[in-house]
Structures are given as structure tokens and as C-alpha cells.
């Protein structure tokens, strides 16, 4: 019993162990404290996180597996962040959620943890926390929703919101029909059914080795998710018995595998900041440039929105994640293990593709080179990212005059002004949307196009921002510009009319302004008026300590880990 971490609370016959046991005896028998592993289920279920609302049901299946394996399941509700609901942006609280979860895992008498998440920031926050406390841990992704239809056409959650709203602004879809599509968009429980951030991070959790192999991508309403949740509960007890911790699973090879998978899947650009942040908690050497050098030559194989045509339940029926990974098996690190202790590649032997429209063969990819391109230049000294698979090919090399917006409010006020001096060749620049400036780095980089250009049939333009965009979004959008304007980055110097040069092939992003003038130019005072200046609370702590996008936008005092030990008694 002394080998169990929970025994530090429960073992013995002194007053403190009595107190710890007594308060847990509301239904737990005496033999619950005889050395059985106590497994927390870190549960992000919340009615205000609609994508995760079904996780209480999933937790019950996990609990059944833990009990079957001889463990004690313990529901641990943790901070839940609803991407669709919270303002100003869910990213503001990713680090806070990770910190709170880490502290609760460390502070409580548990031996291991099952991490239940789905919505965009919940799986990253859970993995950041688990990495920092390093208790035996395993993820159950909540899974995507089923596909809804409108006017007989499948709807991609998120992606078709952007498309339909632009059609309204272009005058080709009535607002009445737009509102009618609302009830069709969300057909079932689960997160977005496109290859957005939630789908991407659920799948990458498995590629990282942190799930029961084969579970990621299972649709939320599918009974097989509950079956896998039960099996994960059994596995959680085994992890504790074997002492297998995240630090053994989450190696550099695991992260490089995730970058390969990100490219092949056409996954969200948000994975860049999340994977960098998770690696930062472990001290794993991973940089923004790794996403380009490792992923840029990987072919795009999955034909899913926003980069393609199909949706997540199509990917699942077509063979799922393992079928995709089997196509790029030679690019994966064969030594990277999963929570089972076996290498990830061992689970690919039986993978089959059942629909070659959804999962393309390596010899016939959607695009031969996918992944994330990392750009540098006088506009982005520390880098910026673009997702070529979601961009218009003819805009990946472009030169055009800047139309600058100093804030989201400025954008909303002026974008549709008929007198706005903008053409299809213009480059829309939005600043003040980075981690410090907003605060929290919101998903606003995929700016709407000016109404007068939509009416002319324009459907894409080059857009540049120091914020993020939804993984469900699309277009030629340069984002994560670092340093951000609010941190002294050169994006604050850009003026309307400056010629902007985007050259994705050569990985460049520049303002064509004479070097002497550029060096002497002062940042925009109008932009500075909109930067966040919180007086107190988490926002103040966040703005004062958050890093930039190129390192994962984690807070400086949260980098690294503290382990699972708590030396002092509570009574």
C-alpha cells in the first residue's frame, strides 16, 4: 500500500489519515483504502461547453472500467472552456485551466487520471496539466458530432457558418434562410465535425500516444466511444500499476509524429501553439520551425473541410486515423510509444482505407506538400504561420497595398464602408489581437471580406493578423505574427498603403518599405489605444506573463513541471 501515492493520505491510524478516510466513506467501503488505485476522471463536462456536455455519460463508462480493474473511480470536475461561448476568447483561459487542473491533480489523493475533453482548448489544457504533474494519465477524446444537412447539402460546423454568413453579406442568401440553417448545423452531441481544432487535437492526442489506440475520431454519439471509455478505465489502472507516466510517452519523437499527422490530416493551425505549449511543460525541445521542416513535405491525404469536402464521420467510416497514419508510416518515429507501452506504429498493421475519396493514397494526394508554412521577414521577425492547404494557390505569392485595422472594433466599423479604399489585390491587416493585446489571441484572423468585394464575386484575399483563426476557417490567412503588435512587434508600424509582399514558397512576409524609414517609423498610437490593460485578476496575470505565439503562448511561470509530490499535511 505504501507504494500508492494515495496511501500518503489514507494509510495509517493517526488523526490525519482518519480524517482523509472518514470524509470519503460516503459510499466507499473500508477496502477502498486497502491499496487499490484511486483514479480521478478530470471531467470538463459543462452545459456552457456544449461540445463537452456528454462527457458525464462518458465518465460513467470510464468509471465502470476502473471498477472492473479493481480501482476506485473519482469524478473530478475541472475548468471547462466553451470555445463557442466565452468572451473575449477561450484561449485567454487555456493556461489558467491547465494551471488549475495541474494543482487539483497534485493536491488530491489520486494515483492516476483519465482526462476527458473535446472542445478546442480542453484537451490542450488537460495535456499541459498532466505533463506538469506527471501522474499516470490517459485521454478520452469526446468525439465529433454527426453531420447535419441544409437544403440537402451536408453542413460543416464552423466552416459553413463562415461561408453562409459571407453569402448573406454578398446578397446571394437571404437572412431568413441563413437563420433557418442554424438548427441544422448542430445535429448531435460532440464537437465540430470539420477538421477544426477540436478534431485536430483529439486526433493528435492519439498520435502523441496519450489515448487508447483506435479511439480518437470516434463520433460522440457512437456506442463504440463508450466501449472505448470503459477500456480506457481498465487501462488507467494498468498505467498506475506499471508507473507509466506522460513523460515516458510524450517524447520529441511523439511530437514530430504529431506534426506529420497534422499535415496529412490538414489539421488546424491552432495545433502549433498547443503542441508547443505541451512540449514546454515537459522540456521537450520543439520549435515553431519544426512544423515547417518536418511537416511541409508531407502530402495532404484527408479530404475534409475546411481544406476539402467531407466531414469527421466520413473519416471514421473511411478507416479513421490509423488508415491515414499507415499511408505515412515511413515518416513516423517507430520508437515513439503509446500509453499501452507499445509503439504507435504497431497499431497500424491492420489499418485499411474503405473510401479512397475521403482518404487519398500517398501516390494521389490532395496536395503533395501540406503542413504549416512558417514565414519570416520584417513583418514577422519571430515568425508567422499560414496553412497552404486552406489557402488560394494564386495568393500564396502576392504583392498588394495594406488596408490596416487597429482593432477588431475598427475592422467591424469600417470593413463594409462603401468608401473604403480596397480592391481584391489589397492585403487586409488586423493588429492588436495577440496574446497580450486582446488579451488571449482570439480567432479573428480570418477577417470577413469587404461587402463590396463580395458583391463582385471575390471570395478570398490575403489577410494578416497577430491573432489566430478557427481551425474550421479557410482562406489565405497569415496568422500568429510574432512578436505581436502589443509586444512591440513591427505589425504596429504598418500603414495603409504600404506594399505587403507574401511569398510562401520562399517563406517570406515583408513590408516593402525602405529599411531606414522602417527602422525610424513609430508604432501606431491608435492601435495602442486598443491594447488590453487589465487592472486585476487572471487577465492582469496573463498579460504580464504570457509568451508569444512562436513559443506556444504559455505563461512564463508555468513552463516546466513540478511533479506530483505535496510535502505538507493539511491538518
Image: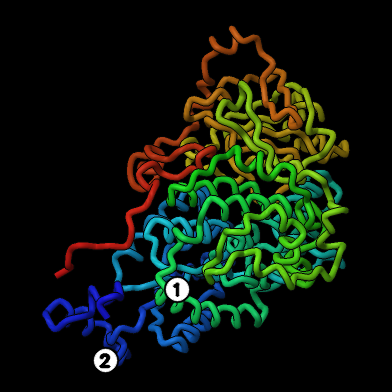
Q: Is residue 170 left or right of residue 65?
A: right
Mark 2 secondary-structure assignment? helix
Q: In the rendering, at what x and y percent does residue 153 appear?
A: 85, 64
Is residue 39 depicted above or below 177 in this figure? below
Q: Quadrant of residue 105?
A: bottom left
For mark 1, give the secondary structure: helix
Give the distance between the C-alpha atoms of the residues marked 2 and 1, in whole angstroms.
Answer: 24 Å
Q: Which residue is mark 2?
A: 30
Q: Is residue 183 visible?
A: no
Residue 541 lies, with reference to residue 379, above or below; the image says below
As drawn, is 382 to the left or to the right of 13? right
Residue that appears at 39% across and 61% down: 134
Front residue (pair 336, 565): 336
Task: Tell me if 403 is positioned left or right of 76 in this view.
Answer: right
Picture quarter with the C terminus = bottom left
Residue marked by disc 1: 239
**Label 1 neighbourhood size at 10 Å, few (<14), some (14-19), many (20+)?**
many
Which mark is first along the chain, 1 or 2?
2
Foreground: disc 2 or disc 1: 1
Is disc 2 surrounded by few (<14), some (14 to 19) or many (20+) residues within 10 Å? few
Q: Which mark is residue 329?
A: none
User: Residue visible at 63% across and 68% down?
Assistant: 216
View extreme (front): residue:
335
Amino acid at each position: 500500500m505504501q507504494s500508492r501515492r494515495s496511501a500518503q493520505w489514507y494509510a495509517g491510524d493517526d488523526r490525519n489519515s482518519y480524517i482523509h478516510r472518514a470524509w470519503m466513506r460516503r459510499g466507499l467501503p473500508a477496502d477502498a483504502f486497502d491499496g487499490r488505485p484511486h483514479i480521478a476522471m478530470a471531467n470538463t463536462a459543462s452545459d456552457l461547453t456544449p461540445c463537452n456536455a456528454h462527457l458525464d455519460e462518458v465518465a460513467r463508462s470510464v468509471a465502470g472500467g476502473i471498477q472492473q480493474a479493481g480501482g476506485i473511480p473519482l469524478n473530478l470536475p475541472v475548468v471547462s472552456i466553451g470555445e463557442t461561448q466565452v468572451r473575449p476568447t477561450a484561449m485567454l483561459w487555456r493556461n489558467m485551466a491547465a494551471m488549475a487542473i495541474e494543482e487539483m491533480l497534485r493536491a488530491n489523493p489520486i494515483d492516476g487520471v483519465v482526462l476527458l475533453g473535446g472542445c478546442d482548448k480542453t484537451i490542450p489544457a488537460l495535456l499541459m496539466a498532466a505533463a506538469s504533474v506527471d501522474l499516470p494519465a490517459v485521454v478520452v477524446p469526446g468525439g465529433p458530432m454527426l453531420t447535419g444537412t441544409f437544403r440537402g447539402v451536408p453542413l460543416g460546423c464552423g466552416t459553413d457558418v463562415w461561408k453562409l454568413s459571407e453569402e448573406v453579406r454578398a446578397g446571394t442568401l437571404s437572412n431568413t434562410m441563413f437563420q433557418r440553417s442554424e438548427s441544422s448545423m448542430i445535429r448531435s452531441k460532440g464537437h465540430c465535425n470539420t477538421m477544426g481544432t477540436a478534431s485536430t487535437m483529439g486526433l493528435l492526442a492519439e498520435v502523441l500516444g496519450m489515448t487508447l489506440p483506435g479511439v480518437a475520431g470516434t463520433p460522440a454519439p457512437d456506442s463504440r466511444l463508450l466501449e472505448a471509455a470503459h477500456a480506457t478505465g481498465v487501462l488507467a489502472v494498468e498505467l498506475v500499476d506499471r508507473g507509466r507516466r506522460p513523460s515516458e510517452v510524450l517524447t520529441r519523437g511523439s511530437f514530430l509524429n504529431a506534426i506529420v499527422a497534422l499535415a496529412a490530416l490538414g489539421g488546424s493551425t491552432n495545433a502549433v501553439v498547443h503542441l508547443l505549449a505541451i512540449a514546454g511543460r515537459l522540456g521537450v525541445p520543439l520549435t515553431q520551425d519544426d512544423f515547417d521542416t518536418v511537416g511541409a513535405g508531407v502530402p495532404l491525404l484527408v479530404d475534409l473541410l475546411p481544406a476539402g469536402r467531407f466531414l469527421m464521420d466520413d473519416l471514421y467510416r473511411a478507416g479513421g486515423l490509423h488508415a491515414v497514419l499507415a499511408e505515412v508510416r515511413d515518416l513516423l518515429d517507430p520508437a515513439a510509444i503509446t500509453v499501452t507501452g507499445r509503439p504507435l506504429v504497431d497499431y497500424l498493421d491492420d489499418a485499411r482505407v474503405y473510401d479512397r475519396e475521403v482518404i487519398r493514397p500517398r501516390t494521389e494526394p490532395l496536395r503533395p506538400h501540406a503542413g504549416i508554412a512558417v514565414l519570416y521577414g520584417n513583418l514577422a521577425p519571430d515568425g508567422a504561420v499560414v496553412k497552404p492547404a486552406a489557402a488560394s494557390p494564386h495568393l500564396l505569392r502576392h504583392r498588394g497595398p495594406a488596408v490596416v485595422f487597429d482593432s477588431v472594433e475598427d475592422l467591424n466599423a469600417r470593413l463594409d464602408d462603401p468608401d473604403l479604399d480596397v480592391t481584391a489585390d489589397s492585403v487586409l491587416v488586423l493588429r492588436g489581437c495577440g496574446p497580450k493585446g486582446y488579451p488571449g489571441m482570439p480567432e479573428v484572423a480570418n477577417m470577413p471580406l469587404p461587402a463590396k468585394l463580395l458583391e463582385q464575386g471575390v471570395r478570398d484575399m490575403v489577410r494578416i493578423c497577430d491573432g489566430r483563426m478557427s481551425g474550421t476557417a479557410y482562406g489565405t490567412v497569415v496568422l500568429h505574427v510574432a512578436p505581436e503588435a502589443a509586444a512591440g512587434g513591427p505589425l504596429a508600424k504598418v500603414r495603409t498603403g504600404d506594399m505587403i509582399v507574401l511569398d510562401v514558397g520562399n517563406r517570406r512576409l515583408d513590408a516593402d518599405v525602405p529599411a531606414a524609414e522602417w527602422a525610424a517609423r513609430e508604432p501606431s498610437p491608435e492601435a495602442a489605444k486598443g491594447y488590453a490593460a487589465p487592472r486585476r485578476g487572471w487577465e492582469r496575470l496573463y498579460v504580464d506573463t504570457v509568451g508569444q505565439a512562436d513559443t506556444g503562448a504559455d505563461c512564463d511561470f508555468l513552463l516546466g513541471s513540478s511533479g506530483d509530490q505535496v510535502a505538507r499535511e493539511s491538518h
